[in-house]
Amino acid sequence: MSIILDHVNYVYSAGTAYEKHALKDISLKIEDGQFIGIIGHTGSGKSTLIQHLNGLIRATSGAIYYNGEDIYDKGYPLQKLRGKVGLVFQYPEHQLFETTIFKDVCFGPKNQGLSQNEAELKAFEALRAVGLSERLWYQSPFDLSGGQKRRVAIAGVLAMKPEVLILDEPTAGLDPKGRDEILDQVVRMHRELHITVILVSHSMEDVANYVGRLIVMNRGQVMFDGVPREVFAHYQELEAVGLSAPQVTYLMHDLRRRGLSVDESATTLEEAKASILRALQVGSK
Amino acid sequence: MNFIEARRLVHEYIRRDEEGNVESIQTALDHVDLDIEPGKFVAVLGHNGSGKSTFAKHLNVLLTPTEGTLWVDGKDAADEENLWEIRKNAGMVFQNPDNQIIASVVEEDVGFGPENIGVPTPEILKRVDQSLKSVGMSEYRTHSPNKLSGGQKQRVAIAGVMAMEPKCIVLDEPTAMLDPNGRREVLSAVQRLNEEKGVTIILITHYMEEVVDADQVFVMDQGKVVMEGTPREIFSQVETLKQYRLDVPQITLLADELRKAGLAVPKGILTRQELVDVLCRLY
């Protein structure tokens, strides 16, 4: 079970003055059950890339295999693929439209051709999974707070029972607590529903805290691909392309320069704390 | 004199059914008292739904008070006669750059505001020049806004506000949709306007790191101002902030954790440099 991208290229508006080579020769393997972060500055190709994964955009050249099958084969059920690879766009709450939350979440599974009963069952499970209190389910989605609306929108995608869940900046515009709540929920879903999660984010701290594998996009190419601490070790190269490392990583480099023997590759608060305490204990002895 | 003065400011969103009967009342601002001096860089924090944006929208009279009074630059915001004067003096920048840019060329977009209020053409050109320069976007003057990055679009939006020569700019989460580089660009442009042109800045944000250099911070919760002080005073109260669904900068949080672990780290560390200095002294 995996997604494989084999030398994928995508060119926008080919043959016009606006031609843009948005993805250049991308080859990637996304294994089942991974928790992946994608970072990159605006226009680096992140969104174009994720829209390839569920066939919303068709590559100009190259191939994409979902569980071993070429999704560009004649007769490949792209409709089904879109149920299996669920994509939550930026500001998904703008896509809510039904009169009640529950009806809104039923929309996806009903569209997949499920009966009313089956769709309701799926909606029930999805709303449970995103942790939205049951007393809200039959209210209008428009009366909810920003964070709650976003959960409903994510539930709408989850109700289609995806094997892969892609979230494009799920925390944009949320307050710090709302950010943590959504991300913790995503971690829980990853663990309990055994789904692959791909998180597109502009927050270096968030990806450092949550993902196991980090892909950096730049000018339509994969610039780095590895565990966060490896990737953030290249912080100067990241800065050159409009990104950065988590704040604590910079701190560790500063401390090192001042002679403290701390671990420079720390990317999370916990790692930094442990390393600083260790370095100071050793120093004072 | 204060540039902004709010006294027992109340705003209620009232929902009515088809017959006009009141269905529900939501109090978004609940007796807010708040003063902002001219030329200051002020940050407003608060969780989603705490009343920040409702407050911001009062500052240029997109909303009017249900009760209480608000003076902007000495003018009563409830008096319709002051409407245009206040809007000219307190410009607003919103979260999504794509919703704020209307023209197909950068310079036309920046000139739209002054043109709209009948500023003579040579003066408009001068203002467009200066505004674009002040946000570092002069070289994009004749470009299409469509091709710009998020941070560049947001700076064009700020230039559009600057062309109105406001005394104050209110920014409602201007960096929420931007990548790290875009955030840096926008923030440093805003800081420069504050320092060099003396424009009063009111920045609403969910990014605690952006608040570190502010002169003054207000924290809102349930329509009330619940905390007020310098960034250092506010961010030394980690637990209280968490109650209000907020956070502190990552560096401040780390310093706090180290202090709890027994290191002699003072409260309210804000920057990397400060923490490095403290830790090196302990070493």
Image (cartoon, coloured by chain):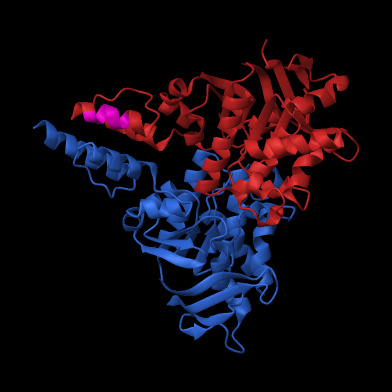
Residue B51 sits inside the magenta stretch: no
The secondary structure that most of the magenta stretch takes on is helix
- Residue at 42 percent across and 28 percent down: it is B239
Towards the viewer: A221 or A227: A221
Q: Is residue B222 visible?
A: no
The chain drawn in red is B
Seen in the picture, residue A97 relative to A250 is either above or below; the reply is below
Image quadrant where residue B136 sits: top right
Quadrant of the frame with the N terminus of chain A: bottom left
Q: Residue placed at 78% from the left, 46% from the top?
A: B108
- The percent position of residue B149, horizontal first and vertical second, equals 61, 52
Which of the chains is blue?
Answer: A
Q: Is residue B280 left or right of residue B97?
A: left
In the image, residue A212 above or below residue B59: below
Relative side of B11 to B194, left or right: right
Report x, y in % for residue B158. Answer: 67, 38
Q: Quadrant of the C terminus of chain A?
A: top left
> Which quarter of the picture shows residue A48?
bottom right
- Is B277 one of the magenta-colored residues? yes
Q: Residue furthest bottom?
A: A74
In the image, residue B115 above or below residue A227: above
Q: Residue at x 50, y 54 (%)?
A: A201
For the image, the number of numbered tags is 0
| Side of B95 where A268 appears, left or right | left
- Looking at the image, which residue sits at the far front? B122
Where is residue B67 shown, x and y percent of the image?
77, 18
In the picture as drawn, the residue positioned furthest to the left comes out as A285
The image position of residue B159, as x and y in percent, is 69, 38
Task: Give the residues in magenta.
Answer: B275-280
Q: Is residue A201 visible?
A: yes
